[in-house]
Each structure stands twice: as C-alpha cells, then as structure tokens.
Image: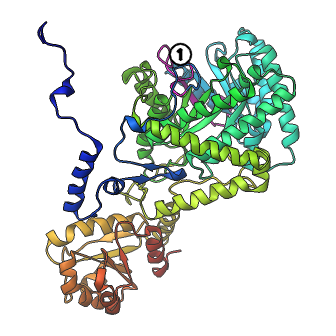
Amino acid sequence: MTAESPELPLAAAFPEADRAQWQRLVEGVLRKSGVTEASGAAAEDALATDLQDGIRVRPLYTAEDGGGALGHPGFPPFVRAGRPQGGAISGWDVRQRHTDTDPRRANAAVLADLENGVTSLWLTVGDGGLPVSGLAAALEGVYLDLAAVVLDAGADFAPAAEELLRLHAVSEAPLGEAAGGLGADPLGLLARTGDADALGSRLAAAVGLALRCADEAPGMRALAVDALPYHEAGGSPAEELGTSLATGVAYLRELTGAGLEIDAACRQLEFRYAATADQFLTIAKLRAARRLWARVAEVCGASPAASAQRQHAVTSSVMMTRRDPWVNMLRTTVAGLSAGVGGADAVTVLPFDAALGLSDAFARRIARNTQSVLLEESHLSKVIDPAGGSWYVERLTEELARAGWAWFQEIEGAGGQAAALRSGLIGERLAATWRRRSADLAHRREPITGVSEFPHLGEVPVVREAAPVPAGRGSGGLPRVRRDDAYERLRARSDAHLAATGSRPKVFLAALGPAAAHTARVAFAANLFQAGGIEAVHEPASVDAGSVAEAFVRSGAGVACLCSGDAVYAEQAAAVAAALKSAGASRVHLAGRPGERRAHYVEAGVDSFVFAGCDAVEVLTSALDVMEVA
C-alpha cells in the first residue's frame, strides 16, 4: 500500500458472496450426487444434522445466526468465562480421580499424580471407596495448603467431611485458607440410589456443613451439584443443564432458609458436568450452564461477583468402551480439550481403562499427561474463550440454553428436583432419551470406533482389578448406561462360544463376481459381523452357484452373506442363495439394499438385507440366535 492509496482488507479483492449464491452451489452438488432435487433453503436443509434436544445443526452459519448477549469474560452472563482472566494465568485445575479402596496404594498414586502435574484430588470415600478412617493415610505427605481435595463420599459425606476438616485443622495449613470441596449432594444421591427416606436428614447434614464452611473455610465448597447421574442415565446435554439448575435452586432454598445470605449460599456450590467427545456440544453446554446459572442467581438477588458458576468437567463414562479401550485415549483427549475450551474451572480426564476396573499407574499417567499436553504444549488456557465468536458455537450455546431452561421450568412446575425424582418424571424423560439414542447406536448412525466400527476380534483383553461398587448403587435409582452396552452383550456371547468350542461363530462371505464388484461390500459385511463377535470367512475370494456350497461347508460357518454389486446380484444372487440354503446355511444375508428385486431374492432364500443404516444389533442378534450361541 502507498501513502496515497487507502488500506483495503484482503476480502475486498474478491466478489461479495451471499447465502443464496452458496445455496445455488449446494443445489448443483446435490443434483450431481443424485441425493435430492431440492433448491434454495431446502437444499441447505438437506445437509443439516439433527441432534438431541430438538437441535438441528445447519451446514453454514453466518453473523445472522449469532446467539444472545455474550457479555465480557468474568461478568454476567459469564458465557465467555467465569473469571475475567479465564484460565490464562494459571490454567484450569487438573483434578485426578482416585477410587482405590486401599489407603496405602491410594497414597502412592496420589503422590505420583501431585508430583507430575495434577493440581487437585478427587477422592472416592466411604461406601465403595476409601474407608473414612483411611483418609489420613491416603493423604499422608500431601500439603493440603497446596493441593485441594474434593470428596465423593455418597451417603457417607458427613463423616468423610468431618475427617477432611479435621485433617486440615491438624495440618499447618490454616482452615480459613483451605480450598476443595466436601462433595455433599443429597439430591444426586437420591438420583443414584432412589433412597428418598433419608433425604431430609441428608439435606440437614449438608446445610450444616455449608454453614460451617461459610464460617470457618470460605474457600471450600460444601455442596456438589452433580449432573453426572443424569448424563450416566442416558440424559441429553439440555437435560443435564435443566436438572443441574433445579438441583442448584433446591440447595439455594435450603441454604438461605438456614440463614445464609444468597451470595454466601452461591459460593457453597460447585457444578459438575460431563464432557464428551462431541467437542462443540461440550463447549456450548458449559457456556450455556454459566449463562443459565447467572440468570438464576440474578433472580435470587445474588451479586454479580457471586453469580459465576464454579464448574468441574469430567470426561464422560458413558462414552468409554470396554472393547479396544485404547481408543478411549482419543475420546478423553477430545473431551478434555472441549472442557478446557468451554471454560471449566476444573477438569478430570478419566483413565482409558476406567470402564474395566481400577486403573493402573500407566493409565493414570496417560490421563494426567493428556491435560499437561493441552495446557503446556497446546497452550489452550492462554486464550480466554477460544470458541467465542464462532457463529456455530454461539448459536449452539443459545439453543442449548433455551432447551435446558425449558426442562428446568418443567421440573420446577412439577414441584422441584426432589419431587420430580420421586414421581419418576426425570427417570421417564431420561429413559425416553436413551431409547432414541440407543436406536441411533443400533443403526450405527452414531458409530463407536473399535466396537460398532472397525472391531478387532483378535485383540488381547485388558484386564484390571474389579472396582468396588457402592452398596446402594443401582438398587432403585437411575440406571447407568454405556454406549457400547448392546454390542458388549453380543461380544460376550461370542466370547462364551469361543470358550466352549475353541472358535468364534462364523459367517461365510460369498463374494460374487470380480474384486471390483464385491470388495466394498465384503469390507462392509466383515466390519458389520465382527461388531457382534462373528468372524468373517472370505475364502475363496470369489464364488458362484457351482462352487459356493463346497466353500460354505469348508468354512465351518453357520450363516452366509452375499457380497457384490447390484448388477452381479441380478445375475447370480438367487442361484447362489438357493445353493447356500441347500448346503445348510441357517440364514442367508445379502449386503445392500434389494430395491425392486426384494421379493425375488427372498423367494430364492435370502433371509435379510444388511446395508448402511440397518439395525445392526437386530441383525447380529438374529445371526447369533440361529447359530445357537448362548
């Protein structure tokens, strides 16, 4: 640029584009692909994706799609961050979870974590965790003024809290400067166990701890507003938000009713949310949670300084798989990144083997190093609200906030969180959500790498010592689900067959025609059947009606699947299917959509058709059933 010429932005050199122009380009691509003849907004809608909570993700977002008021970091509505500096100065709190019941082993793991990057501890204590009497041994050598301790003690939260407060009192760290949390969550305990009889006494105990913390240890938070029970029961992001708001409001009522000022009551709460491998949903959920709580606090009369939600994000246990657990490292890395970018104050990355039992030292090291890399090498915390300004994220934040607020209002209209849990309103809503998601998982619209996609039947199982289960867990509360549940049941049947017979159930892939015709569907069918623990036998490389019977018998398989292109099917499928049935195939599948020839193929002996989007769980279950796999 010269002194005489004005500076022009780079975009000025390009012609201005508008949405209509982009839609016309989309129309052309869709027509060429044969997907649809839609035009204009309908063409754009053809590329949209439906998420939970009635949210529809469009393929293009512009400034017209921005959400509500963002404010500034550290100021209401706290969408951009709970503190003005975000995590730019010290990063977020790296909080490692410990579930070992042996105090000495727990102590060794705790000290190793603190020496290698962990900044706070999350300890399971009481029923299903460390004995309360072993808390001192587990924390031996820990400087409580440097490392905050957060408890997860379930029904034993009161004695566990008393023991932690005692340890603070006898240490050199002044109790008035203590940080961490006592983890009292009576409503979360009600959700997990269904034990409503003890709710009143537990609420009273939790309020007593909060009053003591407010007076003696203002930096410690007595109550946890844990949304994990609802996420782990199959709840959607908006359902997590709504239940957490209703729980937080219930606790504010109890605390202020006991005499705490609203600001002090707000400072006694820490909110816990799940972080999943859907990075944008996680980022938007955490931003929406801060916005919604700021509104609740404002209506309750809290000052802006006390209205910021304190957030603890935990990588989702629902997404963790038991087969090929190494892939969990990828899932937790994305989830941890999303939690940090979303502005969580504390982040827990679960070890990759957490679904298998007690994690070993290697898995814990990988978990803490995941956060170290995100903080120290990727420098994620050095930018305040790095997702801010993304029209997609802003819109998603807005839509999640509205859906979460609507669910919160429904719970409040039913009498509040406790009443909604007792009546079954929450349980029924979460169950319906999980049924819809289970259908997506069964049809592989939501793929699970290493489980429903790209399974490895020859993998060496990862074995861990069984983790303790709290006595009241699952007896009458909300269920705990995992994405891999249906496929895990199928693989367990295959494992039992392997143990009993020395081999896995098999499917013979009858590849018809040249490799160019059948390779794609052979790969598809092998991937599908292996997801159910059924070994795919593809030998010889190609068969026809004259050779297929001998090849099938030699394979030792119980069922068969035809694999080829539609043109080859038209010529050979009927004859090959009939030959397979004559050779003893109890079930014959055909890879691909049959179209107008369905009746012809069925008449020849084809029992079912497998294709992208079919109910994989139903197909695999029926295949194992006819092979009499227990």
In percent of width and height, residue 118 lies at 53, 23
In percent of width and height, residue 503 lies at 40, 70
* Residue at the (63%, 30%) spot, across then down: 106
In percent of width and height, residue 349 lies at 51, 34
* Residue at the (31%, 75%) spot, across then down: 593
Left or right of 530 on screen, residue 597: left
Q: Which residues are magenta?
A: 79-104
Which quadrant of the structure image shows residue 576?
A: bottom left
Frontmost residue, 541 versus 474: 474
Left or right of 234 on screen, residue 136: right
In the displayed structure, would residue 555 be above or below residue 603?
Answer: above
Does the magenta run of residues contain 80? yes
Frontmost residue, 388 versus 594: 388
- The prevailing secondary structure element of the residues shown in magenta is loop
Does the magenta run of residues contain 530? no
Colour setup of the view: rainbow
- Please give the residue where the numbered disc 1 appears in the rendered image: 84
* Residue at the (13%, 74%) spot, across then down: 514
Which quadrant of the structure image shows residue 296?
A: top right
Frontmost residue, 201 versus 528: 201
In the displayed structure, would residue 20 be above or below residue 630?
Answer: above
Left or right of 437 on screen, residue 147: right
| Residue 518 in view | yes
